[in-house]
Image (tube, rainbow, N blue to C red):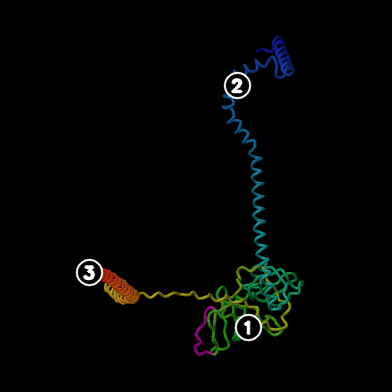
Amino acid sequence: MRDTRESRLLLVLLIAIAFALITVDIRGGEDSPVDGARQAAAGVFGPVENGVAAAVDPVGNAIGAVRDSGRRHDRISALERENAELKARLGSDDRNRSRARELDKMLKKAGAGQYGIKGAEVIAIGAAQGFSWTVTIDIGSREGIQRDMTVLNGDGLVGRVTTVGPHTATVLLANDPDFTVGTRMEKTDELGFATGQGDRPLAVQLLNGKAKVKKGDRLVTFGSQASKPFVPGVPIGEVVRVDPSGGDLTRTIYVNPYVGFSKLDIVGVVVQAPRTDPRDTVLPPKPAAPKPTPTVTVTVNPGQNDPQGNEQNNAQGDDQTEPQTDRTDSIQDDQNTPQDDQNSVQNDQNSAQNDQNGVNNGQTQGTGRTEGQAQGDGQNDQQ
Protein backbone atom coordinates (compact mmCIF):
# COMPACT_ATOMS: atom_id res chain seq x y z
CA MET A 1 0.00 0.00 0.00
CA ARG A 2 1.36 3.31 -1.04
CA ASP A 3 1.85 6.14 1.42
CA THR A 4 -0.71 8.60 0.05
CA ARG A 5 -2.85 11.31 1.55
CA GLU A 6 -5.92 9.08 1.40
CA SER A 7 -4.17 6.22 3.21
CA ARG A 8 -3.04 8.52 5.99
CA LEU A 9 -6.55 9.94 6.32
CA LEU A 10 -7.97 6.40 6.49
CA LEU A 11 -5.44 5.46 9.22
CA VAL A 12 -6.34 8.51 11.28
CA LEU A 13 -10.04 7.74 10.85
CA LEU A 14 -9.59 4.11 11.99
CA ILE A 15 -7.62 5.24 15.03
CA ALA A 16 -10.32 7.75 15.93
CA ILE A 17 -13.02 5.10 15.58
CA ALA A 18 -10.96 2.72 17.76
CA PHE A 19 -10.63 5.34 20.52
CA ALA A 20 -14.32 6.08 20.29
CA LEU A 21 -15.22 2.41 20.67
CA ILE A 22 -12.84 2.02 23.62
CA THR A 23 -14.40 5.07 25.31
CA VAL A 24 -17.92 3.75 24.79
CA ASP A 25 -16.91 0.30 26.04
CA ILE A 26 -15.34 1.68 29.20
CA ARG A 27 -18.29 3.92 30.01
CA GLY A 28 -20.78 1.15 29.33
CA GLY A 29 -19.21 -1.23 31.87
CA GLU A 30 -20.95 -4.60 31.97
CA ASP A 31 -23.78 -3.25 29.71
CA SER A 32 -21.40 -2.08 27.03
CA PRO A 33 -23.06 -1.90 23.54
CA VAL A 34 -19.99 -3.51 21.97
CA ASP A 35 -20.05 -6.54 24.29
CA GLY A 36 -21.92 -8.65 21.74
CA ALA A 37 -19.43 -7.77 19.04
CA ARG A 38 -16.57 -8.65 21.42
CA GLN A 39 -18.02 -12.09 22.16
CA ALA A 40 -18.61 -12.74 18.47
CA ALA A 41 -15.03 -11.76 17.68
CA ALA A 42 -13.76 -13.96 20.52
CA GLY A 43 -15.74 -16.93 19.15
CA VAL A 44 -14.25 -16.40 15.71
CA PHE A 45 -10.67 -15.51 16.53
CA GLY A 46 -10.26 -17.57 19.79
CA PRO A 47 -9.46 -20.91 18.11
CA VAL A 48 -7.07 -19.14 15.78
CA GLU A 49 -5.27 -17.55 18.73
CA ASN A 50 -5.00 -20.91 20.53
CA GLY A 51 -3.51 -22.57 17.47
CA VAL A 52 -1.02 -19.77 16.93
CA ALA A 53 -0.07 -19.86 20.66
CA ALA A 54 0.46 -23.64 20.58
CA ALA A 55 2.77 -23.24 17.62
CA VAL A 56 4.65 -20.25 18.99
CA ASP A 57 4.95 -21.21 22.75
CA PRO A 58 7.83 -23.73 22.36
CA VAL A 59 9.86 -21.16 20.51
CA GLY A 60 9.03 -18.52 23.10
CA ASN A 61 9.88 -20.86 25.98
CA ALA A 62 13.18 -21.72 24.39
CA ILE A 63 14.01 -18.05 23.92
CA GLY A 64 12.99 -17.36 27.53
CA ALA A 65 15.08 -20.28 28.79
CA VAL A 66 18.11 -18.98 26.93
CA ARG A 67 17.46 -15.50 28.31
CA ASP A 68 17.07 -16.83 31.91
CA SER A 69 19.89 -19.39 31.78
CA GLY A 70 22.38 -16.90 33.14
CA ARG A 71 20.25 -16.05 36.15
CA ARG A 72 19.51 -19.72 36.81
CA HIS A 73 23.19 -20.61 36.63
CA ASP A 74 23.99 -17.88 39.13
CA ARG A 75 21.24 -19.17 41.44
CA ILE A 76 22.54 -22.74 41.21
CA SER A 77 26.07 -21.54 41.96
CA ALA A 78 24.79 -19.63 44.99
CA LEU A 79 22.93 -22.70 46.27
CA GLU A 80 26.02 -24.87 45.78
CA ARG A 81 28.12 -22.40 47.77
CA GLU A 82 25.54 -22.37 50.58
CA ASN A 83 25.49 -26.17 50.59
CA ALA A 84 29.29 -26.33 50.78
CA GLU A 85 29.29 -23.83 53.66
CA LEU A 86 26.71 -25.87 55.54
CA LYS A 87 28.73 -29.06 55.05
CA ALA A 88 31.89 -27.30 56.20
CA ARG A 89 30.06 -25.98 59.26
CA LEU A 90 28.73 -29.42 60.13
CA GLY A 91 32.15 -30.96 59.64
CA SER A 92 33.69 -28.25 61.78
CA ASP A 93 31.16 -28.91 64.56
CA ASP A 94 31.97 -32.64 64.50
CA ARG A 95 35.69 -31.89 64.62
CA ASN A 96 35.22 -29.42 67.46
CA ARG A 97 33.27 -32.00 69.46
CA SER A 98 35.97 -34.59 68.81
CA ARG A 99 38.69 -32.19 69.93
CA ALA A 100 36.71 -31.27 73.01
CA ARG A 101 36.51 -34.96 73.95
CA GLU A 102 40.27 -35.36 73.41
CA LEU A 103 40.99 -32.29 75.55
CA ASP A 104 38.70 -33.51 78.33
CA LYS A 105 40.35 -36.93 78.29
CA MET A 106 43.82 -35.38 78.45
CA LEU A 107 42.86 -33.12 81.35
CA LYS A 108 41.59 -36.15 83.27
CA LYS A 109 44.92 -37.92 82.70
CA ALA A 110 46.81 -34.86 83.89
CA GLY A 111 44.58 -34.60 86.95
CA ALA A 112 45.09 -38.28 87.84
CA GLY A 113 48.88 -37.90 87.66
CA GLN A 114 48.96 -34.36 89.10
CA TYR A 115 50.82 -33.10 86.04
CA GLY A 116 50.89 -29.39 85.23
CA ILE A 117 50.40 -29.21 81.46
CA LYS A 118 49.94 -26.71 78.65
CA GLY A 119 47.72 -27.73 75.78
CA ALA A 120 48.94 -27.55 72.20
CA GLU A 121 47.81 -28.43 68.71
CA VAL A 122 49.80 -30.49 66.23
CA ILE A 123 50.29 -28.25 63.20
CA ALA A 124 52.82 -30.24 61.16
CA ILE A 125 54.37 -33.68 60.77
CA GLY A 126 58.10 -34.08 60.34
CA ALA A 127 60.76 -31.43 60.81
CA ALA A 128 63.85 -30.03 59.19
CA GLN A 129 66.15 -31.76 61.69
CA GLY A 130 65.81 -35.08 59.86
CA PHE A 131 63.87 -37.03 62.51
CA SER A 132 61.66 -39.65 60.92
CA TRP A 133 58.89 -39.55 63.52
CA THR A 134 58.32 -36.00 64.74
CA VAL A 135 55.53 -33.45 64.94
CA THR A 136 55.46 -29.69 65.34
CA ILE A 137 53.21 -28.07 67.95
CA ASP A 138 51.96 -24.48 68.07
CA ILE A 139 53.53 -23.37 71.39
CA GLY A 140 57.16 -22.55 72.17
CA SER A 141 59.47 -20.67 74.50
CA ARG A 142 57.06 -17.73 74.77
CA GLU A 143 54.62 -20.13 76.48
CA GLY A 144 57.28 -21.59 78.80
CA ILE A 145 58.15 -24.67 76.76
CA GLN A 146 61.68 -26.03 77.20
CA ARG A 147 63.73 -28.80 75.71
CA ASP A 148 63.33 -32.33 77.21
CA MET A 149 59.78 -31.91 78.47
CA THR A 150 57.37 -34.84 78.46
CA VAL A 151 54.51 -34.72 75.93
CA LEU A 152 51.33 -36.73 76.46
CA ASN A 153 47.68 -36.85 75.40
CA GLY A 154 44.51 -38.49 76.66
CA ASP A 155 45.85 -41.98 75.83
CA GLY A 156 49.38 -41.88 77.19
CA LEU A 157 52.96 -41.03 76.31
CA VAL A 158 53.43 -39.12 73.03
CA GLY A 159 57.13 -38.20 73.19
CA ARG A 160 59.51 -35.49 74.36
CA VAL A 161 60.36 -31.97 73.23
CA THR A 162 63.62 -31.79 71.28
CA THR A 163 63.70 -28.34 69.69
CA VAL A 164 62.03 -25.14 70.89
CA GLY A 165 61.32 -21.97 68.95
CA PRO A 166 59.58 -18.77 70.04
CA HIS A 167 56.12 -19.96 68.98
CA THR A 168 56.60 -23.61 68.00
CA ALA A 169 58.35 -26.74 69.23
CA THR A 170 59.38 -30.08 67.78
CA VAL A 171 58.36 -33.30 69.52
CA LEU A 172 60.19 -36.61 69.01
CA LEU A 173 57.54 -39.32 69.06
CA ALA A 174 57.86 -42.42 71.22
CA ASN A 175 57.85 -44.77 68.21
CA ASP A 176 60.94 -43.19 66.65
CA PRO A 177 63.97 -45.55 66.54
CA ASP A 178 66.07 -42.89 68.32
CA PHE A 179 63.58 -42.65 71.19
CA THR A 180 64.31 -44.42 74.49
CA VAL A 181 62.39 -44.21 77.77
CA GLY A 182 62.70 -45.98 81.11
CA THR A 183 59.72 -48.24 81.90
CA ARG A 184 58.20 -49.90 84.96
CA MET A 185 55.83 -52.86 84.94
CA GLU A 186 52.47 -52.51 86.65
CA LYS A 187 52.34 -54.25 90.09
CA THR A 188 55.62 -56.19 89.66
CA ASP A 189 57.73 -52.99 89.28
CA GLU A 190 60.11 -54.72 86.85
CA LEU A 191 62.28 -52.07 85.17
CA GLY A 192 63.34 -51.81 81.55
CA PHE A 193 64.01 -49.55 78.56
CA ALA A 194 61.59 -49.06 75.67
CA THR A 195 62.77 -48.21 72.16
CA GLY A 196 60.62 -47.13 69.21
CA GLN A 197 60.31 -49.27 66.09
CA GLY A 198 58.29 -47.10 63.75
CA ASP A 199 54.90 -48.58 62.99
CA ARG A 200 55.73 -51.78 64.91
CA PRO A 201 55.29 -52.36 68.67
CA LEU A 202 57.83 -50.86 71.06
CA ALA A 203 60.71 -53.16 72.01
CA VAL A 204 61.25 -53.22 75.79
CA GLN A 205 64.37 -54.77 77.28
CA LEU A 206 63.73 -55.84 80.88
CA LEU A 207 66.69 -55.73 83.25
CA ASN A 208 65.61 -58.98 84.90
CA GLY A 209 65.95 -61.88 82.47
CA LYS A 210 63.82 -64.11 84.69
CA ALA A 211 60.99 -61.64 85.13
CA LYS A 212 57.54 -63.16 84.84
CA VAL A 213 55.68 -61.33 82.10
CA LYS A 214 52.53 -62.27 80.24
CA LYS A 215 50.48 -60.86 77.42
CA GLY A 216 48.29 -57.94 78.55
CA ASP A 217 50.65 -56.64 81.26
CA ARG A 218 50.91 -52.85 81.26
CA LEU A 219 53.84 -50.42 81.51
CA VAL A 220 54.30 -46.81 82.62
CA THR A 221 57.24 -44.41 82.50
CA PHE A 222 59.77 -44.88 85.28
CA GLY A 223 60.70 -41.20 85.37
CA SER A 224 63.96 -39.32 85.01
CA GLN A 225 66.07 -37.34 87.42
CA ALA A 226 64.48 -33.92 87.96
CA SER A 227 61.60 -35.27 85.78
CA LYS A 228 63.46 -34.46 82.55
CA PRO A 229 62.94 -35.70 79.94
CA PHE A 230 60.24 -37.93 81.45
CA VAL A 231 57.90 -37.62 84.40
CA PRO A 232 56.89 -40.86 86.17
CA GLY A 233 53.60 -42.75 85.82
CA VAL A 234 52.65 -41.86 82.22
CA PRO A 235 50.95 -44.90 80.53
CA ILE A 236 52.99 -46.42 77.69
CA GLY A 237 51.14 -49.53 76.47
CA GLU A 238 50.36 -53.25 76.88
CA VAL A 239 52.51 -56.31 76.28
CA VAL A 240 51.60 -58.16 73.08
CA ARG A 241 54.52 -60.63 72.82
CA VAL A 242 57.21 -62.03 75.11
CA ASP A 243 60.44 -63.55 73.86
CA PRO A 244 61.77 -66.63 75.70
CA SER A 245 64.35 -65.73 78.31
CA GLY A 246 66.90 -68.33 77.19
CA GLY A 247 68.93 -67.80 80.34
CA ASP A 248 70.08 -64.30 79.31
CA LEU A 249 70.59 -61.53 81.81
CA THR A 250 67.91 -59.42 80.09
CA ARG A 251 64.58 -60.24 78.47
CA THR A 252 62.86 -58.57 75.50
CA ILE A 253 59.13 -57.97 75.32
CA TYR A 254 57.03 -56.08 72.78
CA VAL A 255 54.51 -53.45 73.79
CA ASN A 256 51.62 -52.02 71.78
CA PRO A 257 51.52 -48.27 72.62
CA TYR A 258 48.28 -46.65 73.77
CA VAL A 259 48.84 -43.60 71.55
CA GLY A 260 47.98 -43.61 67.85
CA PHE A 261 50.93 -41.65 66.47
CA SER A 262 49.41 -41.25 62.99
CA LYS A 263 46.33 -39.33 64.23
CA LEU A 264 47.65 -36.85 66.78
CA ASP A 265 45.77 -33.58 67.21
CA ILE A 266 45.59 -32.23 70.78
CA VAL A 267 48.58 -32.85 73.06
CA GLY A 268 49.83 -31.53 76.38
CA VAL A 269 53.35 -30.55 77.41
CA VAL A 270 54.14 -31.27 81.08
CA VAL A 271 55.55 -28.02 82.45
CA GLN A 272 55.26 -29.05 86.11
CA ALA A 273 56.14 -32.51 87.43
CA PRO A 274 54.03 -34.22 90.12
CA ARG A 275 55.18 -33.94 93.74
CA THR A 276 54.97 -37.70 94.22
CA ASP A 277 55.16 -40.64 91.85
CA PRO A 278 51.59 -41.45 90.75
CA ARG A 279 52.62 -45.09 90.26
CA ASP A 280 49.81 -46.93 88.42
CA THR A 281 46.95 -44.49 89.10
CA VAL A 282 47.08 -42.93 85.61
CA LEU A 283 46.56 -46.26 83.84
CA PRO A 284 43.05 -46.76 82.46
CA PRO A 285 40.82 -49.10 84.46
CA LYS A 286 40.82 -52.68 83.27
CA PRO A 287 37.56 -53.93 81.74
CA ALA A 288 35.45 -56.10 84.01
CA ALA A 289 35.75 -59.84 83.43
CA PRO A 290 32.67 -61.31 81.70
CA LYS A 291 30.30 -63.22 83.94
CA PRO A 292 30.29 -67.00 83.35
CA THR A 293 27.24 -68.29 81.54
CA PRO A 294 25.48 -71.12 83.40
CA THR A 295 25.25 -74.39 81.47
CA VAL A 296 22.58 -77.07 81.80
CA THR A 297 23.59 -80.70 81.20
CA VAL A 298 20.87 -83.11 80.10
CA THR A 299 21.61 -86.85 80.47
CA VAL A 300 19.75 -89.07 78.03
CA ASN A 301 19.08 -92.79 78.83
CA PRO A 302 20.37 -94.74 75.81
CA GLY A 303 17.65 -97.38 76.27
CA GLN A 304 14.70 -95.05 75.85
CA ASN A 305 14.76 -94.99 72.08
CA ASP A 306 15.44 -98.65 71.24
CA PRO A 307 12.82 -101.46 71.27
CA GLN A 308 14.63 -103.39 73.94
CA GLY A 309 14.67 -100.35 76.17
CA ASN A 310 10.96 -99.85 75.55
CA GLU A 311 10.26 -103.47 76.51
CA GLN A 312 12.29 -103.04 79.65
CA ASN A 313 10.45 -99.83 80.48
CA ASN A 314 7.11 -101.53 79.82
CA ALA A 315 8.10 -104.48 82.00
CA GLN A 316 9.22 -102.15 84.73
CA GLY A 317 5.97 -100.22 84.37
CA ASP A 318 3.94 -103.44 84.66
CA ASP A 319 5.92 -104.56 87.68
CA GLN A 320 5.36 -101.21 89.28
CA THR A 321 1.67 -101.12 88.34
CA GLU A 322 0.77 -104.61 89.64
CA PRO A 323 1.92 -104.03 93.25
CA GLN A 324 0.22 -100.69 93.16
CA THR A 325 -3.04 -102.31 91.97
CA ASP A 326 -2.81 -105.12 94.52
CA ARG A 327 -2.17 -102.61 97.25
CA THR A 328 -5.18 -100.56 96.18
CA ASP A 329 -7.44 -103.62 96.02
CA SER A 330 -6.27 -104.76 99.46
CA ILE A 331 -7.05 -101.36 100.93
CA GLN A 332 -10.45 -101.43 99.27
CA ASP A 333 -11.13 -104.94 100.70
CA ASP A 334 -10.09 -103.77 104.15
CA GLN A 335 -12.53 -100.90 103.85
CA ASN A 336 -15.33 -103.22 102.65
CA THR A 337 -14.85 -105.83 105.45
CA PRO A 338 -16.23 -103.62 108.30
CA GLN A 339 -19.18 -102.80 106.11
CA ASP A 340 -19.81 -106.48 105.50
CA ASP A 341 -19.56 -107.21 109.24
CA GLN A 342 -22.06 -104.47 109.96
CA ASN A 343 -24.44 -105.85 107.37
CA SER A 344 -24.07 -109.32 108.93
CA VAL A 345 -24.94 -107.93 112.37
CA GLN A 346 -27.95 -106.17 110.91
CA ASN A 347 -29.07 -109.43 109.30
CA ASP A 348 -28.67 -111.24 112.61
CA GLN A 349 -30.78 -108.63 114.35
CA ASN A 350 -33.47 -108.94 111.68
CA SER A 351 -33.40 -112.72 112.03
CA ALA A 352 -33.83 -112.46 115.81
CA GLN A 353 -36.71 -110.05 115.34
CA ASN A 354 -38.36 -112.47 112.97
CA ASP A 355 -37.92 -115.29 115.48
CA GLN A 356 -39.50 -113.14 118.19
CA ASN A 357 -42.44 -112.36 115.92
CA GLY A 358 -42.87 -116.10 115.27
CA VAL A 359 -42.96 -116.90 118.99
CA ASN A 360 -45.57 -114.24 119.61
CA ASN A 361 -47.71 -115.55 116.80
CA GLY A 362 -47.41 -119.07 118.13
CA GLN A 363 -48.46 -118.01 121.58
CA THR A 364 -51.51 -116.23 120.28
CA GLN A 365 -52.66 -119.21 118.25
CA GLY A 366 -52.21 -121.64 121.19
CA THR A 367 -54.31 -119.45 123.52
CA GLY A 368 -57.21 -119.41 121.06
CA ARG A 369 -57.32 -123.11 120.91
CA THR A 370 -57.28 -123.49 124.65
CA GLU A 371 -60.20 -121.11 125.19
CA GLY A 372 -62.21 -122.94 122.55
CA GLN A 373 -61.50 -126.23 124.13
CA ALA A 374 -62.48 -124.82 127.52
CA GLN A 375 -65.79 -123.61 126.18
CA GLY A 376 -66.39 -127.03 124.67
CA ASP A 377 -65.61 -128.63 127.94
CA GLY A 378 -68.00 -126.36 129.75
CA GLN A 379 -70.83 -127.13 127.38
CA ASN A 380 -70.20 -130.83 127.83
CA ASP A 381 -70.28 -130.46 131.54
CA GLN A 382 -73.64 -128.63 131.41
CA GLN A 383 -75.21 -131.35 129.31
Measure the alpha-carbon separation of dots 2 and 1.
99 Å
Task: Kindly identify which numbered label has been placed on residue 182.
Answer: 1
User: Looking at the image, is mark 3 or mark 2 nearer the viewer?
Assistant: 3
Q: Position of residue 165 (x, y in %)?
A: 73, 72
Q: Earlier in the sequence, mark 3 or mark 2?
A: 2
- Residue stretch rendered in magenta on the structure: 239-248
Measure the alpha-carbon separation of dots 3 and 1.
164 Å
Tell me the quarter of the picture where residue 185 sits.
bottom right
Callouts 2 and 1 close, C-beta under 8 Å:
no
Q: Position of residue 66 (x, y in %)?
A: 62, 36
Callouts 3 and 1 close, C-beta under 8 Å:
no
Residue 320 in sight from this viewpoint: no
In this view of the protein, which residue sits in the foreground, 264 or 89? Answer: 89
Q: Position of residue 15 (x, y in %)?
A: 72, 15
For the N terminus, the quadrant is top right
Mark 3 sits on what residue?
380
Assign the magenta stretch its main secondary structure.
Answer: loop
Mark 2 sits on what residue?
46
User: Looking at the image, is mark 2 or mark 1 nearer the viewer?
Assistant: 2
